[in-house]
Amino acid sequence: MDDKEWVLKVSVMRAMLKLGLPIAVIQALHITYNLTDMFWLGRLGRNALAAINATWPIIFLVISGLAGLLQAGISLVSQYWGAREYNLSMRAAGQVILIVLLTGIPITLAAYIAIQPLLQLLGVPHEVIPDAVTYGRIFALGFITYGLMDSAILIFSATGDTVTPMKVTVVGVLMNVVLDPILIFGLGPLPHLGIAGAAIATLISNLIAISIIIYLLVRGTRWVNLSFSHLKPHQELLKKLIRIGLPISISSVGEAAGFTVLAGIISLMGSAALASWGIGDRPLGLLDIFVGSLLSAATTMIGQSLGAEMLSRAKKVVYRTLTYGVLITSTGILSYILLRFEIVSLFTPSDVEVIQNAADFVLYMGPSIIFFTILRTAFAIATASGHTKIIMFLSILRLWVLRNALAYLFGPGPLNIGVKGLWIGMSISNVIAGLLALGWILRCSWLKPIIKPINT
């Protein structure tokens, strides 16, 4: 058996496990990093936690335009790989890297400049803004490394190698876990840096990780060998990336802007609501250890199957992914709801108001995450197939038409239910979007490849 074709030749379950287990380790490590940040910053008080939660939507807004083009790379790299067009697959990978290199500095400058006025515009509590600006500006300095890291992981994964990015991620996250408390609280001659220390720890650990993975890309592994010639601009491939990625980018910008506005709506209820949103939401990321790895594996499998014109196999992967995703999410959410007070108390042991609000978030939002998993499955299918307009439609609908409007209506708005109302409005948006996504999946309009022979 040709190793390059193993994803298409082994059973669906075996391919899911072989691709998914290393990705599960990556997801677990990222969750470890996020929870470590929350754990140590929680010792600084609610303002530090609120600062992180206020900053992330804005950071996401600034970089989201690039996200679509990176995701489009999955479609092209995996489908050309499945079609045995390995040189075209690497040319597509090179175009993704090129885009990151060309846009990294402008995005960094935009984020550095925009963070403070956007926080003020959104009405983030004044006591939270200084920490949020500090964290956001330091974090923004590493945007180009984050983009390169995501691109490299995408390239390896789309070709069927998820072990290499797993090993590199282990190094980066372990470095971050060690540096976090040292830089936040100080050690020996190192000063107490507070929230700035958390951002610096992330920056240093990412620089180390990206240096390793770029070296591996260029040096070459068993299958992947990216040369500098692959970075030469290729008009047809760049057009494909833009055509596939533009709807995802619009979706990402709309989603980021929506979450930025949502942060402003939650801020109307005070810093306790803002902090409890982050505390309640972050542990949900533990599901990504399983669901995220499943969807990432499925994206590679669907893309390669479509490229090889193995349409029945692509459908089989989709239906199994949907079934497993719903089962995993249901089990995880039930456990979280039952243990919600114990879990959220780990992050802020003495703030009773934040604990109660976070526990309510889990209770009201938890069941809707099942529908969110269905939505994420649709997004994975769209990304793998290259039929991405549905992502744009559902994202804008969920956040702008439904989530923000309902969160305001039930929360600080006319119905004025309070913090619980925020969570109720947000959960309704997940349910509606998930049902619409299920309908699109079952129509199978995604079941055709988007690659064609092109001049190399």
Image (cartoon, rainbow, N blue to C red):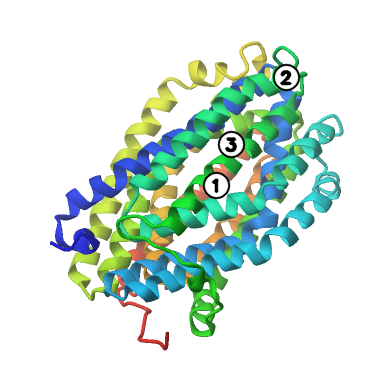
Look at the image and tell me whether residue 396 can be seen.
no
In what element is the residue under mark 2?
loop
Which residue is at a point 53% across and 81% down the rendered structure image? Answer: 239
Question: Of the residues shown, which amino acid type is indicated by label 2?
Answer: Gly
Of labels 2 and 3, earlier in sequence is 2
Check the picture and name the quadrant holding the N terminus. bottom left
Callout 3 amino acid? Ser
Q: In which quarter of the image is residue 344?
A: top right
Say which of marks 1 and 3 sits in front.
Answer: 1
- The residue lying furthest to the front in this view is 219
Q: Mark 2 points at which residue?
A: 45
Q: Which residue does the numbered mark 3 point to in the structure image?
A: 205
Mark 3 falls on what kind of element? Answer: helix
According to the picture, the residue beneath numbered tag 1 turns out to be 211
**Could you tell me how far apart the alpha carbons at marks 2 and 3 are, in whole angstroms?**
25 Å
Label 3: few (<14), some (14–19) or many (≥20) C-alpha neighbours in 10 Å: many
Callout in the foreground (2, 1): 1
Foreground residue among 216 and 392 = 216
Taking the view exactly as shown, the residue that stands out farthest to the bottom is 455
- The amino acid type found where label 1 is placed reads Ser
- Report x, y in % for residue 229: 50, 73
Indicate left or right for 395 with 117 as reference: left
Marks 2/1 in contact by CB < 8 Å: the verdict is no
- Within-10-Å neighbours for mark 1: few <14, some 14–19, many 20+: some
Instruction: Looking at the picture, tell me which residue is in the foreground, 410 or 161.
Output: 161
Q: What residue sits 67% from the left and 23% below the top?
A: 41
Mark 2 surroundings within 10 Å by alpha-carbon count, few (fewer than 14), some (14 through 19), many (20 or more): some
Element carrying mark 1: helix
- Residue 223, image x, y percentages: 31, 60
